[in-house]
Amino acid sequence: FDRQAAELLGRTAAVVELLLRADESAAAARRLEQAASALRLAVLQLLMVEDTVSARRVAAGLWPGLLDTDTATVYVVEVRPDERERLTAECLDAAGRRALVVRCPAVDGHVIVVAPAETVGRSLRSLVGGRPHTYLGGSTRHTLARTATAYGQAVSALALARVRPDGTAVYAERTHPERLMDPEALRAWSGRLLRPLDALPHHTRAELVATTRLGLEFTAVSAARILGVSRNTVRARMERAERLLGADFSQLTVRAAVHLALNTEAALGPAPAAAPAPAP
């Protein structure tokens, strides 16, 4: 090569090196985002089974203070599946470090947001408002241990959000039948029905309760994806719950009764051990 060609090759090599470094940096950034996404999902799955201690430990490394509060609201944002990646990025930008933003492992068009900060709801409503085919369902505020209950409420609220002009809705507890019953009688009845579960270790009981609630509300496949376990694990846990409760989940009335009892416990807390248990 002559001198001019050598200089040109040198400059070209320098540009190529910069491009390679940029490509490596982009690849590294993608790997970091994938790792962060996996961690966010892991935190959500821990919250779903009431393991708030482990969830806080995992979250503390990347998002210090995120789960320091005892309560949160859960939102589910629905969009067309091919638009979810963009929406997830926008939710992350809107929420910042104030919320846990997770691509739903069960529904391709859903993004789950666990928001300890009350200001996140306004940010999400601004993000969704007026956007075609985009909807937002929100729960009432719950303790972190009741994240699974809040998630179910947010999904329920989506049904109303789809027919509202602004595309948003919050779960309304007053519309559910348990709100028409005497709370103490309902709580006592629920405690009696669920009492066989009380002999289990706390973590085991929490897993059974979370799995059973999700399995009754959704399919076994969806419950498995949300919890990060296999379908066989979901079925095994629900079969164990059936045996302990003396229930047959193939019967619609039994499913409804157990679901009501689980929701009552989540809303009102467990019944005192000595409480009377009249039927509601």
Image: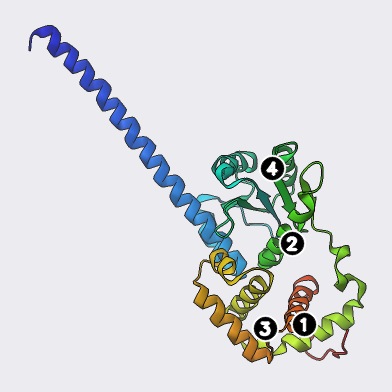
Question: Gap between marks 1 and 2, in whole Å?
Answer: 21 Å
Left or right, 45 with respect to 216, comes to left
Q: Are marks 1 and 3 in contact (CB under 8 Å)?
A: no
Place residue 18 in its image quadrant.
top left
Left or right, 14 with respect to 40, comes to left
- Closest to the camera, between mark 2 and mark 4, is 4
Q: Are marks 4 and 1 in contact (CB under 8 Å)?
A: no
Judging by the rendered image, the residue that carries numbered circle 4 is: 133
Three-letter code for the amino acid on which mark 1 is drawn: Thr
Judging by the rendered image, the residue that carries numbered circle 3 is: 250
Left or right, 120 with respect to 173, comes to left
Image height check: is 32 above or below 231?
A: above
Q: Nearer the viewer, residue 268 or 110?
A: 110
Q: Are marks 3 and 2 in contact (CB under 8 Å)?
A: no
Decide if residue 201 is in sight here.
no
Question: Gap between marks 4 and 3, in whole Å?
Answer: 35 Å
- Closest to the camera, between mark 3 and mark 2, is 3
Three-letter code for the amino acid on which mark 3 is drawn: Ser
Coloration of the structure image: rainbow
Using the image, tell me which numbered label, if any, was put on residue 195: none
Using the image, tell me which numbered label, if any, was put on residue 253: 1
| Image quadrant containing the C terminus | bottom right
- Closest to the camera, between mark 1 and mark 2, is 1
Q: Secondary structure at mark 3?
A: loop
